[in-house]
Image (cartoon, rainbow, N blue to C red):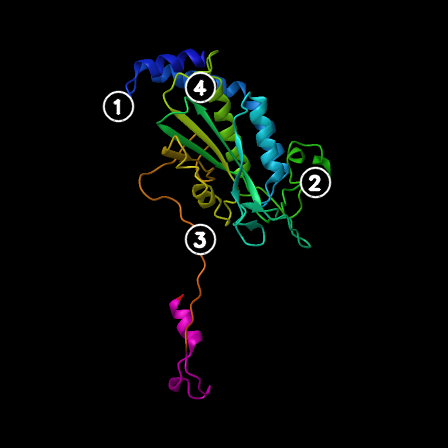
Amino acid sequence: SLKQAAQSFFSSSPATDIAPTNDDDVLQSCINNQSVSIEPFLISIRRVLHRYPELMYQERMTSQIVQRLLTDMGINNYTVGWAKNIHSKYYNPATGKIVQTTEKGEQNDGGGHGVVVDIGSGQEPCILLRADMDALPIVEETPLPPDQQGSDTAKFHSNHHGKMHACGHDAHMTMLLGATYLIKSLEESNGEFPFPGTIRIIFQPAEEGGAGAKRMREEGVLSNFPTVKYAFGMHVWPTLLSGQVGFRSGAMLAAQDNFTLVLDGVGGHAAFPHLCRDPVVASAAFV
């Protein structure tokens, strides 16, 4: 069983030993078998999450789904309220409370929909596993011809018009929920786990431009005891085949930012372009 394989692996493998062993192969095989057994569950969860996408700091339903699934797994020690939107319209830093204001056409309720759960001894070392939660303001145009209205595609097409999980966060949450299930299944009858330390599971809102990870860090998700030593996140990648994982050391993946550049020119007459400094030409050359 997976539990027995994990017990053997952690009891026989020193923390500094990275050479493959038979215990590695047995544990990997058990993980694969257990993963296959929950595949229908994961597929159904991914489709539910895809049908109800929510934008950054609006992930109320998404958070509720995650919390319900954690509870169904027998996990009740999760914490909520992470990644509050500190924009002054939604958050009062003096009181630490969310300001419940909603303007016309606006659904932002102040955020705070992140979910965090620690599994293990509650002691160090602590490893963090993370998935993002929010969707994008995109109209899903997955083709649904009349003869396919009852197809599998119709089962997970976005029900929130103008919003779509187009960046794979529904898949990321599903993968992390699956990993959480496997980790939880290692629990002994006395509440102990075969691995040392703690695994911190975080579901992070507002990745799409909302700096949700920064907010959770400011709120203590890394520094709260046990302090996080390593953090791991995954992102689906369309150029890799299923079953393949890409990684590298050092910096990986870039974030976008905004800036303003002003090019000052000198006006003139179209008949005398050589006597002016045309910012359009300069801008073209700059680009």
Q: Residue at x 41, y 35 (%)?
A: 224
User: Where is mark 2, residue-wise?
Assistant: 145
User: Where is mark 3, residue-wise?
Assistant: 256
Crowd around label 1: few <14 · some 14–19 · many ≥20 (10 Å): few
Residue 56 visible to the viewer: no
What is the CA distance from the residue labelled 1 to the residue labelled 4? 22 Å
Q: Secondary structure at mark 1?
A: loop
Q: Secondary structure at mark 3?
A: loop
Give coordinates of residue 6: x percent, y percent: 39, 15
What is the CA distance from the residue labelled 3 to the residue labelled 2? 36 Å
- Residue stretch rendered in magenta on the structure: 265-286
Mark 2: amino acid: Pro
What is the CA distance from the residue labelled 1 to the residue labelled 2? 56 Å
Q: Earlier in the sequence, mark 1 or mark 3?
A: 1
Q: Earlier in the sequence, mark 3 or mark 4?
A: 4
User: Where is mark 4, residue-wise?
Assistant: 31
Crowd around label 2: few <14 · some 14–19 · many ≥20 (10 Å): few
